[in-house]
Image: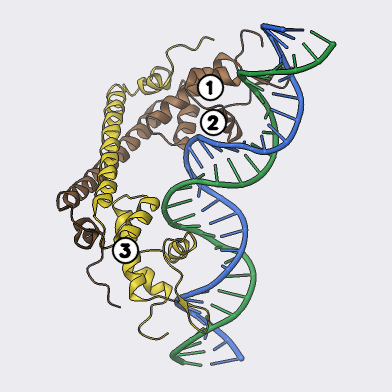
Chain colours: A brown, B yellow, C blue, D green
Amino acid sequence: MAQRFLAIGELARRTNTKVETVRYYERIGLLSAPARTGGNYRAYSSQHLARLSFIRRSRDLGFSLDQVRTLLDLSDQQARSCEAVDAIAREHRDEVDRKIADLQALRRELDNMIDQCRHGTVADCRIIEALSPATTRV
Amino acid sequence: MAQRFLAIGELARRTNTKVETVRYYERIGLLSAPARTGGNYRAYSSQHLARLSFIRRSRDLGFSLDQVRTLLDLSDQQARSCEAVDAIAREHRDEVDRKIADLQALRRELDNMIDQCRHGTVADCRIIEALSPATTRV
DNA sequence: ATGCTCCCTGTAGCAACTACAGGGTCAAGG
DNA sequence: CCTTGACCCTGTAGTTGCTACAGGGAGCAT
């Protein structure tokens, strides 16, 4: 392969992505199809590398593929106001906040449960008890 | 239907579950197949109600279906030590802890990104910049 | 007899990958 | 020149935990 292009494995390595995932992104139209070599290998340019890096970084920050798609589109419209970008980021942050709160509530419940475990038999296990319904009558 | 048995809709309502989900739990062997009426309707007993309640409560606490399956098995072995139960609960709590930490780190990054937004054009948007790779050269 | 609500099975869809199977390509070593 | 091994190709199916139909039957009230 000519040195200006990357094979899929090299691209994957540089972006910490699985090869299959790169192909998946192409299939769903997130990463444009690259040129092909004579042997039908994908030949990626530096633009692809940049774009995939952007995608991965966004994914690492928890943006959904749909959000990433929008962010990519927006990043291509350099003259536009970045209001929409800000909105997506804020929305995502709010959701992360909600998730954190949910998990913290969960954690407290789990903690209570675990604290009550007397390490006896299952028959009087407080954890099982906590999971069991109060009434089982129809 | 005889009053001692519950139709699937009633069971679903009492456990805050979708009817399809109840059938799904049966399909994957989490909830045992109930008796059937003459008209081939599922007829659930109070044992089913208790078991499904247990499942839902566990799911609400974030246990995976696999963990729920194990917890159900354990809860049936009343004489056993509840060590294994405790282990599952602790493992899950640790995972919740990790998730919270991950999300908090994420949140800080998002916050930094958002704070730097100067509300100009996309061309000099700090959010886009933060998502973009430092180098794009092959 | 009609309408309505409930129930039945079976299949397909969601997110975001991941994991093959069964083959082709390419460069290096013997 | 041939083989070996690492890489690449396509296509399909699996993962988790449901959810949403489509197309039909059951049961009860009017």
| Residue B100 visible to an observer of this rendering | yes
Rendering coords of residue B48 (x, y %): 36, 70
In three-dimensional space, the C-alpha distance between marks 1 and 3, rounded to whole angstroms, equals 47 Å
Q: Quadrant of residue A31?
A: top right
Depth check, front residue: B6 or C23: C23
**Label 3: element kind:** helix
**Discs 3 and 2 lie in a common subunit:** no
- The x, y position of residue A58, in whole percent, is 42, 28
Disc 2 crowd rating (10 Å Cα; few below 14, some 14-19, many 20+) is few
In the displayed structure, C19 sits above or below A109; it is above
Q: Answer yes or no: do the residues labelled 1 and 3 have beta carbons within 8 Å?
A: no
Q: Label 3 marks which chain's residue? A: B
User: Which mark's residue is nearer the viewer, 1 or 3?
Assistant: 3
Chain for disc number 2: A
Of residue D21 and residue A130, the one placed in the foreground of this image is: A130
Residue that appears at 27% across and 76% down: A137
* Label 1 crowd bin: few (<14), some (14–19), many (20+), radius 10 Å: many
Reply above or below: B108 against A118. Answer: above
Q: Which mark is residue B15?
A: none
> Mark 1 is on which residue type?
Ala
User: Are dots 1 and 2 in contact, CB under 8 Å?
Assistant: yes
Which image quarter is the C terminus of chain A in? bottom left
Camera sees residue A77: no
The residue under label 2 is A21
Q: Nearer the viewer, mark 3 or mark 2?
A: 3
What mark, if any, has residue B76 been given in the picture? Answer: 3
Residue B101 pos. (x, y %): 26, 33
Res. A12 mark: 1
Quick one: quadrant of the N terminus of chain A? top right
